[in-house]
Every structure is written in structure tokens, then in C-alpha cells.
Amino acid sequence: MKMNEKEIQKLMEKLEDGDPGVRENAAKALLHAAIKGQDITPAVPALVKNALSDEDLAVRWNAAGALIYHYVNKGEWNKLGELVAHDIKQTVVKALASFVQTCNSVEKLDNYRNALENFFVEWLKRQPQGRTKEKIEMELKISGLLMAISKRKAELSKEKGELLLGDTVKKPDKDGKKIYRSFRMVSRNG
């Protein structure tokens, strides 16, 4: 069932309720709507401002999932990087890793990887020179997500009878010869 804007507004109000169960159910309803491809744009500010920093893990998890699916549905890949950057409690990073494991589209995985890489390069440009705790933490988050993407792409390639080696796929043709298809290189140095 598709929610109208009035129903989304009610869920936004419930994200501020004193009862964690009410907040969790509201975030979960928004997640399910986003999974189904519904536009939850009016709820995005409330999810980012309140639910992602909620004291309750279930609220944060469902909010992160709703935002991930919303941004993927909209093709707003750069917003995923912004979520990672402001993820204080690591909920978004874990939810993104979970999303990667369930994604069955190499194209979406490539878009996601490209967005993370581009975000990270731009983020680094805005940072002071030298190694800082913040830079190291961000590098670990991004590299972990990039590894999860590579692993999932390898799994999907294997399912199709291909073998993913680094950034190249070996695929047998009709005669058993190997055909090489190149993938864009993943930046390891930022």
C-alpha cells in the first residue's frame, strides 16, 4: 500500500515520540516504503536530523536503511557518502554493508562504489594536511565498504559463471576461450 504525504507527515512526527517502540515502527514503515520505491523525500530531514542519532539502535538501523534505499532509488549516490561521513555510531556503515550484501545489480554496486570514491576524494580535499584520527576513521569506513562491494561483485560474477580477478572478469566464451572484460580500477590511495 502506498502512503500519501499526510501519512508520511504522521510518521515524521512519530520519529520524535518519547517511546522508542513508536520511533522504531515509524522508521521501519519509512524503510518499507523506500524499499518498495516510494518517494519518502518529505521524511528525509527528520530521518537525518533525529532518527540517525537516536539512542535506540533499532531506530537508527531502520532510519539508515530508509535513507539508503531512498538515495539509491533517486540515484543520489553522493548522499550515501555524506551519510557515511556523519555516521557517529557506525549504523549507516553497517546498514550500507548490509545493503551491498543484498544488492543483485552490478550497475548499482558500481554506481555506489564510484560515489563513495568521488565523495572520499572531495572529502579529503577539504581536510587539513597530515594524518588525523578523523581521516584514518574515514579511510577505514570507506575501504571496508569498497571491499564489501568488491566481494559482492565477485559473488555475482561467480553466479554468472565468470571469475572476477581484481578489476578484470574472465568469462569463458562458447568455445571455452577466455574473454576479458575490464572494470574501472578502484582507487586505493584516495
Image (tube, rainbow, N blue to C red):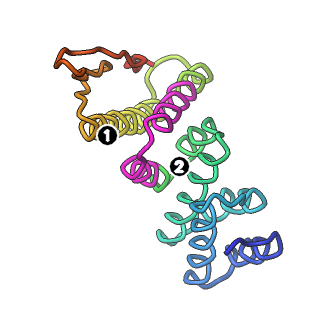
Q: Secondary structure at mark 1?
A: helix
Q: Which residue is mark 2?
A: 87
**Which residue is nearer to you in this view: 177 or 51?**
177
Label 1 Cα neighbours within 10 Å, binned few <14 / some 14-19 / many ≥20: some
Q: Main secondary structure of the magenta part?
A: helix
Q: Residue at x 63, y 66 (%)?
A: 33
**Which residue is nearer to you in this view: 62 or 103?**
103
Q: Tell me the quarter of the image containing the N terminus.
A: bottom right
Outermost residue toward the left?
Answer: 176
Label 2 Cα neighbours within 10 Å, binned few <14 / some 14-19 / many ≥20: some
Rendered location of residue 86, percent (x, y): 58, 45
Q: Amino acid at mark 1?
A: Leu
Discs 1, 2 touching: Cβ within 8 Å:
no
Quadrant for residue 145, please give it.
top left
**Mark pair 1, 2: CA separation:** 28 Å
Pair 1/2: label in front:
1
Query: Does residue 111 show up magenta in the picture?
Result: yes
Q: Which residue is mark 1?
A: 156
Note whether 174 is above or below 96 in the view shown. above
Q: Residue at x 47, y 31 (%)?
A: 110
